[in-house]
Image (cartoon, rainbow, N blue to C red):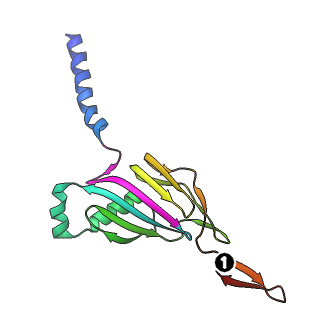
């Protein structure tokens, strides 16, 4: 009789654990992230997110608007100062000003960043290089890059700096 109780307990434990193991890491509420593309230039980041929303939520968006979708996408991206440029039911575009640290003379550092879901395909592009990752929650290590427009500092006759855009 005790063996039956142990077997029943094991089956019950497995049946409770299976739904938890089946949960997708790339999903947040009714949103399933497909890919995120980050384009870096001159200290800012333009972020494009492709995702799917559950079919039964589309009618709710039609009636009530997309504010909840915007809030959830902001939570997924994990940027406090991201601005929404465009949003629909399958993708969105954001801009993050000063996403990178400036070292002057057009040299920037984009630090490591953690997202609040696992991203199936993450692409981070700078003017010089592209880094691609699969099934990751973070952009590890950071990346240095040069801006597309640089400023040359020249001096006048009195050795005073004169900025000149090129």
Q: Nearer the viewer, residue 114 or 120?
A: 120
Decide if residue 164 is on the left or right side of residue 40: right
Q: Residue 157: image x %, image y %? A: 84, 89
Decide if residue 79 is on the left or right side of residue 72: right
Q: Residue 6: image x %, image y %? A: 25, 16
**Disc 1 marks which residue?**
151
- The image quarter containing residue 23 is top left
Work out whether 117 lies above or below 74. above
Q: Main secondary structure of the magenta part?
A: strand
Q: Secondary structure at mark 1?
A: strand
Q: Residue 95: image x %, image y %? A: 44, 70
- Which residue is located at x 38 percent, y 59 percent? 75
Residue 144 visible here: yes
Q: Residue 166: image x %, image y %? A: 64, 80
Residue 78 visible here: no
Extreme residue in the bottom direction: 157
- Which residue is located at x 20 percent, y 66 percent? 61
- Which residue is located at x 56 percent, y 71 percent? 42
Few, some or many residues within 10 Å of mark 1 (<14, 14–19, 20+):
few
Work out whether 71 lies above or below 33. below
Extreme residue in the right direction: 158
- Which residue is located at x 54 percent, y 50 percent? 140
| Count of number-bearing discs | 1
Decide if residue 58 is on the left or right side of residue 42: left
Residue bounds of the magenta highlight: 24-40
Quadrant containing the N terminus is top left
Q: Nearer the viewer, residue 130 or 133?
A: 130
| Residue 35 within the magenta-colored segment of the rendering | yes
């Amino acid at each position: 009789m005790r063996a039956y109780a142990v077997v029943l307990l094991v089956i019950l434990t497995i049946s409770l654990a299976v739904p938890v193991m089946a949960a997708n890491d790339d999903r947040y509420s009714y949103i399933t992230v497909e890919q995120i593309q980050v384009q870096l230039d001159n200290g800012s980041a333009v972020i494009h997110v492709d995702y799917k929303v559950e079919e039964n939520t589309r009618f709710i968006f039609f009636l009530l608007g997309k504010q909840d979708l915007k809030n959830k996408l902001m939570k997924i991206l994990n940027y406090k100062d991201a601005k929404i440029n465009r949003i629909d039911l399958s993708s969105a575009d954001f801009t993050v000003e000063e996403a990178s640290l400036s070292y002057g003379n057009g040299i920037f550092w984009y630090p490591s960043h953690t997202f609040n879901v696992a991203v199936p395909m993450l692409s981070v592009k700078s003017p010089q290089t592209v880094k691609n990752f699969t099934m990751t929650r973070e952009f590890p290590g950071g990346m240095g890059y040069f801006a597309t427009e640089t400023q040359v500092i020249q001096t006048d006759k009195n050795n005073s700096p004169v900025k000149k855009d090129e």
